[in-house]
Image (cartoon, rainbow, N blue to C red):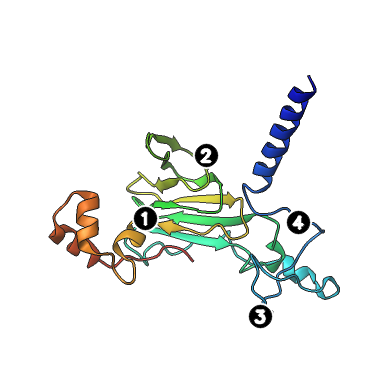
Amino acid sequence: MASSSYVLLFALLALASWQATASDPSPLQDFCVADNSSRVLVNGFVCKDPKDVKAEDFFLAAKLDMPRDTKTNKVGSNVTLINVMQIPGLNTLGISLARIDYAPLGENPPHTHPRATEILTVLEGTLYVGFVTSNPENKFLSKVLNRGDVFVFPEGLIHFQFNPNPYKPAVAIAALSSQNPGAITIANAVFGSKPAISDDVLAKAFQVEKKTVDWLQAQFWADNQN
């Protein structure tokens, strides 16, 4: 009986430990405002002296009520990310925010957030969204969202949003479970890396001719992140 209790206790401790390391570390104080002037390198940012913290450290006049330009790139979207780089007070708090504008038929192309789960809310228009599970299943889960709908993209999984309306734009707000979620746009990373990945490697991986890879690598892979 005692042995079973120890096993149960160990399992609970292991679960608690896993949950504690599954996202940004929990703060051990009220806040740790990032000191961007510090040259000390840590996982995150060094804390500013609490005596020097001001309300402005937690504030940004982001104008998220204003539409963004979706004509600056070929994918027809504009992501305005608000993270610890814009608001130093987000340091160690494990959260960030983004406004995403979509042109008619615009998309936020397949990408991942290596450090965050995302929860997205549609403010205007309609979005077709989805994500793909990890190997070996690679199951595709998708949904059409309308104004007021909410959808979750699990941490690290490839996902996208597409505005299927050819006449009207769409707008969404996303919350992410990291002060610095990161973003890896799949096409940009694979075909627009610097230096370029060998076309022999990519031709083999995608089972296409090398000239197809060369053509893709010659395209201008614009970034829609701001």
Instruction: Kindly identify the residue that appears in the image at 37 percent across and 36 percent down.
Output: 136
> Which residue, as the protein is rendered here, is positioned at the far right?
51
For marks 1 and 4 on the same chain, the one whose residue lies earlier in the sequence: 4
Regarding residue 66, the answer to whether it shows in the image is no
Q: Which residue is mark 3?
A: 39
Q: Quadrant of residue 74?
A: bottom left
Q: Left of 156 or right of it: where is 201?
A: left
Q: Pointer 2 and pointer 1: residues touching (CB < 8 Å)? A: no
Q: Pointer 4 and pointer 3: residues touching (CB < 8 Å)? A: no
For marks 4 and 2 on the same chain, the one whose residue lies earlier in the sequence: 4
Q: Left of 184 or right of it: where is 37?
A: right
| Residue type, numbered disc 4 | Pro
Whole-percent x, y for residue 89 in the image: 72, 65
Q: Which residue is mark 1?
A: 186
| Residue type, numbered disc 1 | Ile
| Residue type, numbered disc 3 | Arg
Residue depth check, mark 4 versus mark 2: number of the one nearer the observer: 4
Residue 171 in the image: above or below residue 45 = above
Q: CA distance from mark 1 to mark 3?
A: 32 Å
Q: Pointer 1 and pointer 4: residues touching (CB < 8 Å)? A: no
Circle 4 sits in a helix, a strand or a loop, which is it? loop
Residue 171 in the image: above or below residue 3 = below
**Pick the front one: 180 or 69:** 180
Q: Pointer 4 and pointer 2: residues touching (CB < 8 Å)? A: no
Local crowd size for mark 3, using a 10 Å CA cut-off: few (<14), some (14–19), many (≥20)? few
| Residue type, numbered disc 2 | Phe
Q: Which residue is mark 4?
A: 27
Q: CA distance from mark 3 to mark 2?
A: 39 Å
Q: Which residue is mark 2?
A: 151
* Label ID, residue 81: none
> Which residue, as the protein is rendered here, is positioned at the far front?
3
Circle 3 sits in a helix, a strand or a loop, which is it? loop
